[in-house]
Image (cartoon, grey):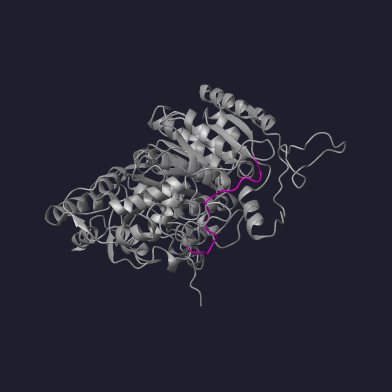
Amino acid sequence: MALPTPLQAFSGVPKTHAATDQQTIIDGEKMTGAQALVRSLEDLGVEDVFGIPGGAILPVYHQINNSTKFRFVLMRHEQAAGHAAEGYALATGKVGVCLVTSGPGATNVVTAIADANMDSVPMVVITGQVGVQAIGTDAFQEADIVGITYPVSKHSFLVTRAQDIPRVLSEAYHIASTGRPGPVVVDLTKTAQTGDMYYSWPQRMILPGYNPTTKAHGRVLSDAAKLFSQSYRPVLYVGGGAARANAGAQVKALADLTGAPVVTTLPARGIIPDTDPKNLGMLGMHGTIAATGAVQRADLLVAIGARFDDRVTGKLDAFAPTARVIHIDIDPAEIGKNRQPDVPIVGDVAAVLDDLIPEIERTQAIQGKPNLAPWWKAIDGWRKEYPMTWDKPTDGSLAPQWVIKKLSELADSSTIWVTGVGQHQMWASQFIDFENQHSWISSGGLGTMGYGLPAAIGASVGSARKFEGKKPVWLIDGDGSFQMTSEELAAAFLDHAPVKIAILNNSVYGMVRQWQTLFYEHHYSQTNLLDGEAHGTDGAGQLADDSVPIEVPDFIKLAEAYGCVGIRAFTEDEAIAAIEKANQINDRPVLIDFRVWKDAMVWPMVAAGASNDEVIYKPGIKPLTGGTPAPGTGPDEHATGVFKHETTTAANEH
């Protein structure tokens, strides 16, 4: 029999104790629970909150006024409030906070909670709830939010007493930001909001058993250093956990010390600069050939804050088949979940690397460094032979990859890049030149379409707060993904968030269309959006007189309707002019409608469930099939170089 969720269990308790909220604590300042919530957020140092009001949370909103120390950003949809809090958290490194009502308000934000949980984003979500006596009665706008969010959050609280609010807020903030970061839900009954309590600060948290391990234990560091000394084909496989731990400097130091190449997952883009010669870029389904090839041929794979996601590994039992594995992660549940490591290390990534690097230095002082020259020859062969490139459109439209490359070239080096989800997301990760940590914000694990615009608003608010607006925010979005939360243009304009929006408008759901092209016999079922000047017979939608293409919506008129600047670009010259104009506008959002080729494909690609050895560089080209050696190594060199174990005491600098 299934056990009841906490809220269901609570609703089954006889409601005969009417005096359960009587206060026994009299130290502190007397106030209502709603006042205590606002005061707690202020005392926690929260400076910006995103949300939408509603009946069950109105007592709290009543306490938000001009004297409140945090700034409230009114969004237009609760899901967007959650994504904005995510973008804010990733741009600033602080905990994102959003405040919504009960029932549909709370269920709307569940998608953002699940998204933050998958991507380890620190966030506190405060939801309204009906009064204690109404729980379990199917009251108006009642929903079991604790039960709903338990599987997709780091933790969920139900608060029924006003006196508990400061303590629970302290605990929620602490849980969200420590260990493996994640979203914490505080479901706040109306009874708790309106009840009286005595406020004091700071609060003593009650978190028995919650002690995240941050330092490596035992002999694991020396074991890891020993594996490095025995490895001639090492790879640092760096994931979002390293980005959350702000470990870019440590990752670079480890790569420089060992000579190992660095490959990243999607959330870790920018962890070290793309200009660093050891950075091979992203690996996996749409990763570079060099990154994917290096992992497939590695003899040592060092997973740093990564979780062996299926989009990275492809067919799991064929992933890095010859590699011993060191796995560093603060979440012990990730160790051995998908791949059993030879050396498991539980701890904060930055702290572990700080301790591991001296251990490797000691080992190198005694044993010297392995000769990685043949390994780098193989890697450089892949890089030279299979660079990131694209096909020229056949219909006269813009190549979406060219647009992104040009956006990157013309942008300020401190730009924060945000994306929606789809083809444009993959192209952005492939063609933007990342030079800084925390310059990339995207929905990775959940792949949430509609994430882009609200996350960009949150990032822009964060940039204004922490960097005085000196870090501009560019959103790269698809026409399909953008329309899922386009109403947030109102929030962007009214909050003076000068987000610059590049819509790669191919008038289709691009990634779905790519799969339909490759795996579903070119049957383009329900993927034509007809929101731009389509090209080709299956995408063209005409008015009755067959003269004017349908544009629903017209993105320029949509932008202008929300007070934003709208620009359209069909040619490369128009695109460059539009980008330059957008870079000069800083008092309102700017939207550019780039008309791009709907048949553009994201390459390289590994088909879902296939081995990474089956990666397709371009149709008909599979560089890694059958254990093919890297270009330039050849059969003889392959036998005596890349896979031959040899040592030298000299440092191998690449």
**Where's residue 391, x and y in %?**
59, 43
**Where's residue 219, x and y in %?**
18, 63
In the drawing, does residue 81 fall left or right of residue 327? right
In this rendering, the answer to whether 545 lies above or below 609 is: above
In this rendering, the answer to whether 212 lies above or below 196 is: below
**Where's residue 498, x and y in %?**
52, 28
**Where's residue 5, x and y in %?**
49, 66
Single out the residue that lies furthest toward the left.
366
Q: Could you tell me what secondary structure mostly forms the magenta stretch?
A: loop
Image quarter (top left, top right, bottom left or bottom right) of the C terminus = top left
Q: Is residue 466 visible?
A: yes
**23 magenta-colored:** no
Q: Is residue 35 visible?
A: no
Please name whichever residue, 448 or 624, is drawn nearer the observer in this view of the structure: 624
In the drawing, does residue 326 fall left or right of residue 628? left
Please name whichever residue, 629 or 581, is drawn nearer the observer in this view of the structure: 629
Please name whichever residue, 44 or 519, is drawn nearer the observer in this view of the structure: 519
In the drawing, does residue 378 fall left or right of residue 626? left
Magenta-tinted stretch:
597-611
In the drawing, does residue 110 fall left or right of residue 440? right
Single out the residue that lies furthest toward the bottom.
1
Quarter of the rendering containing residue 68 = top left
**605 magenta-colored:** yes
Quarter of the rendering containing residue 532 = top right
